[in-house]
Amino acid sequence: MNTILDLHEVSKIYKSGDRTLKVLDNISFSIETGSIVSIVGPSGSGKTTLLGLCAGLDRSTSGSVELHGTRLNGLNEDQLAAVRNQYVGFIFQNFQLLPTLTALENVMVPMELRGEKNVKQRALDLLDKVGLAERSHHYPTQLSGGEQQRVSLARAFSNQPQILFADEPTGNLDAETSEKVVKLLFDLNREAGTTLVVVTHDLELAAKTQRIIRIKGGKIVEAS
Ligand code: ADP
């Protein structure tokens, strides 16, 4: 399959009370399997919302989102979760680790929820891959921002996703730590062929990706 993600005339309207806010307006693009794409644009332009729709975390108001050949719009919650579990990794803004769980448990829990076996050894291997084997029993508050982000990478890699969405993966990290995180993401693309879709403010990171999709006010203003 050459196209892993296809959006056709996608719009998203948020409603609260009688107020409506059109956050995405008629967005269409396709992403090739194995490519690295960044989504850039000013704060509030709809990037996080767009990433959530692409990853099956949320639904568009109109238009269609097709991921790995499956049209997400008509799916119920369980079916959406099944698609995410099978194909999708997601790195959230600000890591979103569970504070009461150790690094190891943060990686293991989603694996257990997916019904996987031998999760402890595999979670340790994943933490080793991101250079954190020795920190596996630390809690998030005992880890630096860069270490927390690497735990969230290990968690996102745990289902060997076909496509990985990352929302500001270097947002709160210093330059040196950012470089390490970006290297891990690009290694995953090179070694496993994982498609990467990255929302970023970091223009250096965007410049390293193969394509840049620029959005403003919920519309695509430029796409390479
Ligand atoms: P970006 O990631 O580019 O900063 P977002 O997708 O986070 O943009 O937000 C786009 C707009 O949608 C903002 O005006 C934001 O306040 C609004 N928004 C985001 N999520 C919600 C929500 N769940 N309900 C209502 N409005 C939202």
Image: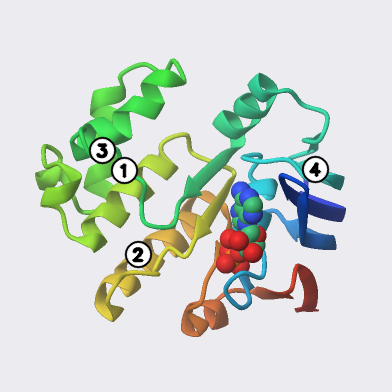
Measuring from the top left, give residue 108's x and y in whole percent. Answer: 30, 28
Q: Earlier in the sequence, mark 3 or mark 4?
A: 4
Instruction: Kindly identify which numbered label has been placed on residue 181.
Output: 2
- The amino acid type, in three-letter code, at marker 4 is Glu
**Quadrant position of the C terminus in the picture:** bottom right
- The amino acid type, in three-letter code, at marker 3 is Asp
Q: Which residue is mark 4?
A: 66
Mark 2 vs mark 3, foreground winner is 2
Residue at 26% across, 77% down: 176
Mark 1 vs mark 2, foreground winner is 1
Relative to the observer, which residue lies in front, 31 or 10? 10
Relative to the observer, which residue lies in front, 60 or 107? 60
206 displayed left or right of 110: right
- The amino acid type, in three-letter code, at marker 1 is Leu
Q: Is residue 35 visible?
A: no
Q: Earlier in the sequence, mark 3 or mark 1?
A: 1
Residue at 42% across, 63% down: 169
Colour pattern: rainbow
Dot 2 surroundings within 10 Å: few (below 14), some, or many (20 or more)?
Answer: many
Q: Earlier in the sequence, mark 1 or mark 4?
A: 4
Tag 2 and tag 3, C-beta contact below 8 Å: no
Q: Is residue 29 above or below residue 105?
A: below
Distance from label 1 to label 2 (Cα)? 16 Å
Distance from label 2 to label 3 (Cα)? 17 Å
Q: How many marks?
A: 4
Q: Which residue is mark 1?
A: 97
